[in-house]
Image: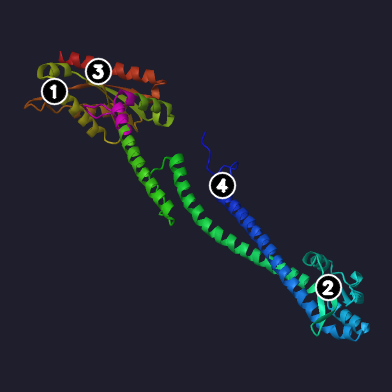
Amino acid sequence: MNKDFTSPSRPTFKRTLRRNSMISVIVTMTFIWLLLCFASVLTLKQYAQKNLELTAATMSHTLEASLVFNDKLAANETLATLGRQGQFAVAEVYDAHKKRFAQWTWDPDDSTDTLGLLVSRWLFPVPVSLPIMHNDTPIGEISLTARDSLISHFIWMSLAVLTICILFASAIALTITRSLHHGIVEEMQNITDVVHDARTNRNFSRRVKEGRIEEFHRFGEDFNSLLADMEEWQHKLQERNAQLLRSAMHDPLTGLANRAAFRNSIAKLMNNSAVKNHSALLFLDGDNFKQINDTWGHTAGDSILTEIASRMIAFGGQRYQSYRLGGDEFAMVLSDVHSESDVQHICTALTQHFNRPFDLHNGHHTAMSLSIGFALAWESPSLELLLERADRNMYQAKNQRTKTIS
């Protein structure tokens, strides 16, 4: 059982290619997004570490005077002022004896920046400590634990921008991929349409259109060449079948339809009441054909049979169909007749058509008569009865002609 190429149980090539392309683009862009995010965060970590070290270095110079003059209030104010700007989470200042001189700690209740806290813990797991110098002599130390809200905000923005860019790039990639795939699908559809038409309808005259893709173009040319060979083979096969059919249904000597064609035609006539009611059957048989054949030979006899067929065709034209049943036996099916007198009139005219001498094509001419019997189709309830009546009437006419000659 043949199945259509676009069976609902199977996904089409276009749908499969589009789905696989979308999956490939999504997986590829997701991997790129993760890779870029990881690289961006590592870069930001290095940047934030350097920034915290720079902040600690700047604050060491700022707190130098407070340590020199032992001004704890000024040191605490400095730490509080910078701490509220979100530069660090914990700041501790120690004097030369490692005693805590000043301290500021970020109160988590003052802010809901949970992401900033998490980022700070990951970016700065170890506090940054730098010495506080005065005249190239260490007089204390500052220790900072990061809480970089600016960096966390920057990470949020970076990830958002990166995600938007990746989505935009994915959309462009999908658009380009679909455009490229549309060309491939169009080429494949062009080929499959021709293949399906050739397989289903045996239409080998159709050709694959010229392709824009080189590989498909070469495939189309090769397939068109194959279709041309198959079309030529099909034409030869059809011609051969037509010749065989003609040989099976026609007499090779006279070219008239033979007995097999006569049986098929008369059977169809009897099964069609509309045609049967206005049709009649004639049987014709040569009266002196055997004498001519024995006297002048088979070649002369063939000339007589050929001439009989020619005169029957000339008489019947397109209205009446003529047949050679074998030997010197012929038949003619009459159409558009309405009474027995119409048939008798046609038989008389046909008999006169054979009164002219026959050329034997050997320098001689001879006369030949044919006995004609008829049967009316509308008076015959069956095919066998129609044939029997025509045959009986033909032999009655032959016997009457024999008696007349005698």
Q: For marks 1 and 2, give the one nearer the viewer.
A: 2
Q: Which residue is mark 2?
A: 144
**Where residue 65 sits: x, y (%)?**
86, 86
Q: Which badge, 4 or 3, comes first in the chain's sequence?
A: 4
Q: For marks 4 and 3, give the one nearer the viewer.
A: 4
Q: CA distance from mark 1 to mark 2?
A: 131 Å
**Do the residues under discs 1 and 4 have CB atoms within 8 angstroms?**
no
- Amino acid at circle 1: Thr
Q: Which residue is mark 1?
A: 299
Which residue in the rendered view is the most extreme toward the right?
Answer: 73
284 shown above or below 7: above
**Where residue 6 sits: x, y (%)?**
55, 44
Q: Quadrant of residue 195?
A: top left
Q: Give the crowd class for mark 4: few <14, some 14-19, many >=20 residues within 10 Å.
A: few
23 shown above or below 3: below
Q: CA distance from mark 2 to mark 4?
A: 64 Å
Q: Give the crowd class for mark 2: few <14, some 14-19, many >=20 residues within 10 Å.
A: many
Q: Is residue 182 left or right of residue 149?
A: left
Asked if the stretch drawn in magenta spans residue 246, the answer is: yes
- Amino acid at circle 4: Thr
Residue at disc 4, secondary structure: loop
Q: Which stretch is magenta? A: 241-262
Q: Which residue is mark 3?
A: 397
| Residue drawn at the location 24% of the way across and 18% of the way down | 397
Judge whether residue 288 can be spotted in this image: no
Q: CA distance from mark 4 to mark 3?
A: 75 Å
**Where residue 218 sits: x, y (%)?**
39, 51
Residue at disc 2, secondary structure: strand
User: Which label belongs to residue 250?
Assistant: none
Q: CA distance from mark 2 to mark 3?
A: 139 Å
